[in-house]
Image (tube, rainbow, N blue to C red):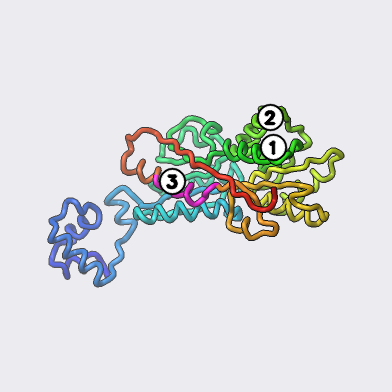
């Protein structure tokens, strides 16, 4: 069905139907209801390209994420999609695969597609600093350049401090860390806070106690734990910077018949759904990825509806989930 046919059945001009679709506030209430009834009855689908020309809006939002293989990122994406759909927007989702060059390429593509706004999760680089498009960044604000964007983040400092305090109170004094990509802002912030928290307790984090993995890889968590186990003065506890790394670490401990938490304690971060089902169930820091995504989408929709509003920064709180690995 074409727009002209809708107009004919409703007894109005095609221009009136177009106005009802794109600027309903300008159409008489009774006429608008008549047009809506025809659209619903005949399941009319407006041409999005034509609507974009009329309104200057595509109702598309570009979402850049580092890797959907990361369960936390998948939850984040679900939160973004859920909130955008409530407001009539569609998310175009692209993986950067943790590549700065791919982030730049995706960003250019989104701008060419004339998306209304952009949400970028944990970007690597400063290519965003001069971005004029409505943008929300997900990740530690203090690691990004000041620019034309709103920001939402998990309380990453609390993730580190809660973990350290928990292990310290359990009697651990040799605490190691398994981090993700060292270029990620989240890695830098959590590592900095972890060192600061240990120092406040009279402890320190020697370089050999820092093992690196990849946030989307369980195997990398296993390899990192293998490195720590090979130390002459090995740690008694490990803080993994996400649950996938922690689960990999636990697998390696099981391979070596090392009892958890009696011989080695492990704490993760994110609280992905699988964490509670792994054996032993993982003690972790609950960081609600779905809520994070929803908050980012809300910020962007608010920015699109009120372009002149003050820049916003939202911090999502975290909490300890005590299970069986500490």
Which secondary structure, mark 2?
loop
Mark in front: 2 vs 3: 2
Mark 1 lies on residue:
168
In three-dimensional space, the C-alpha distance between marks 1 and 2, rounded to whole angstroms, equals 8 Å
Residue 192 drawn in magenta: no
Q: Are marks 2 and 3 in contact (CB under 8 Å)?
A: no
Identity of the residue drawn at 82% across and 55% down: 257
In three-dimensional space, the C-alpha distance between marks 3 and 1, rounded to whole angstroms, equals 33 Å
Which secondary structure, mark 3?
helix
Relative horizontal placement of residue 264, taking residue 49 as reference (left or right): right
In three-dimensional space, the C-alpha distance between marks 2 and 3, rounded to whole angstroms, equals 34 Å
Crowd around label 1: few <14 · some 14–19 · many ≥20 (10 Å): some
Task: Identify the mark nearer the N-term, 2 or 3.
Answer: 2
| Residue 184 appears in view | no
The answer to whether residue 170 is above or below residue 22 is above
Main SS, magenta region, reads helix
């Amino acid at each position: 069905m074409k727009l002209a046919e809708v107009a004919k059945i409703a007894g109005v001009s095609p221009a009136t139907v177009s106005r009802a679709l794109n600027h309903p506030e300008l159409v008489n209430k009774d006429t608008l209801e008549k047009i809506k009834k025809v659209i619903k009855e005949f399941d009319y689908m407006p041409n999005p390209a034509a609507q974009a020309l009329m309104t200057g809006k595509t109702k598309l939002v570009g979402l850049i994420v580092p890797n959907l293989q990361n369960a936390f990122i998948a939850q984040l994406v679900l939160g973004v999609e859920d909130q955008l759909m409530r407001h009539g927007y569609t998310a175009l989702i692209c993986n950067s695969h943790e590549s700065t060059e791919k982030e730049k390429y995706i960003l250019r593509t989104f701008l060419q597609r004339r998306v209304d706004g952009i949400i970028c999760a944990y970007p690597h680089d400063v290519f965003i600093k001069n971005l004029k498009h409505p943008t929300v960044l997900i990740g530690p604000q203090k690691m990004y350049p000041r620019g034309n964007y709103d920001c939402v983040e998990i309380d990453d400092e609390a993730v580190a401090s809660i973990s350290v305090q928990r292990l310290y109170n359990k009697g651990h004094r040799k605490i190691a860390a398994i981090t993700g990509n060292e270029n990620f802002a989240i890695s830098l912030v959590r590592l900095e806070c972890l060192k600061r928290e240990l120092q406040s307790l009279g402890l320190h984090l020697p370089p050999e106690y820092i093992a690196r993995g990849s946030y989307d890889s369980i195997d990398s968590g296993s390899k990192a734990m293998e490195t720590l186990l090979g130390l002459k003065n090995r740690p008694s506890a490990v803080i993994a910077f996400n649950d996938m790394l922690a689960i990999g670490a636990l697998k390696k401990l099981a391979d070596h018949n090392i009892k958890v938490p009696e011989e080695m304690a492990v704490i993760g971060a994110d609280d992905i759904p699988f964490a509670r089902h792994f054996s032993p169930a993982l003690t972790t820091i609950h960081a609600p990825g779905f809520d994070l995504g929803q908050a980012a989408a809300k910020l962007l929709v608010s920015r699109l509806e009120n372009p002149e509003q003050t820049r916003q920064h939202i911090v999502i709180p975290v909490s300890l989930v005590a299970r069986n690995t500490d």
